[in-house]
Amino acid sequence: MKNKTWLIAIAFGLSVVSAACTPQQIVWFLDITEPTRHELNNEELHRLRICESTDNYRAVSPSGTYRGAYQFNQPTWDGVANRHYPWLIGSDPVDVEPWWQDAMARALWSERGAQPWPVCGKRV
């Protein structure tokens, strides 16, 4: 059952990605995100996102410090981007496509587990 859910999630994700991407871009995205894709499944990402931002990829904390669905601050975002997706360095998380925000959250989780999300990480 878990594999079926995963395949459905992948198919859905590909349909969303394919709306704005070429087949080559989709293959590139899948290749580049493969090393950390297993870190959190879609359900776990959803629980983290609900807790952090009420599932809002454009969420901004009241102070403006924490941004996007996973409430990255800019230094953390840039550090993860530097190690995994350098073209995202300097990008404001709220302006980055949801699939890249998800990839960044998975990459950070691969490095530090729940630690960057001291409350919401426990709900994953």
Image: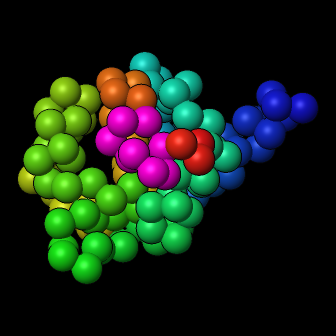
Q: Quadrant of residue 6?
A: top right
**In the foreground, 11 or 39:** 39
**In the foreground, 73 or 32:** 73
Q: Position of residue 87 (x, y in %)?
A: 16, 42
**In the foreground, 13 or 1:** 1
Q: Position of residue 59 (x, y in %)?
A: 36, 73
Q: Main secondary structure of the magenta part?
A: loop
Residue drawn where x is 67% and y is 46% of the image: 43
Residue 96 in sight in this render: no
Check if residue 4 falls in the magenta segment: no
Q: Quadrant of residue 8?
A: top right
Q: If the image is split into quadrants, where does the C terminus sit?
A: top right
Q: If the image is split into quadrants, where does the N terminus sit?
A: top right
**In the foreground, 51 or 89:** 51
Q: Is residue 45 above or below residue 55?
A: above
Q: Is residue 19 above or below residue 102?
A: below
Q: Is residue 23 above or below residue 72?
A: above
From this viewpoint, which residue is outermost toward the bottom? 62
* Residue 79 as seen in the image, left or right of residue 119: left
* Residue 122 as seen in the image, left or right of residue 118: right
* Residue 73 as seen in the image, left or right of residue 47: left
- Magenta highlight range: 114-121
Residue drawn where x is 55% and y is 25% of the image: 38
Residue drawn where x is 18% and y is 74% of the image: 64
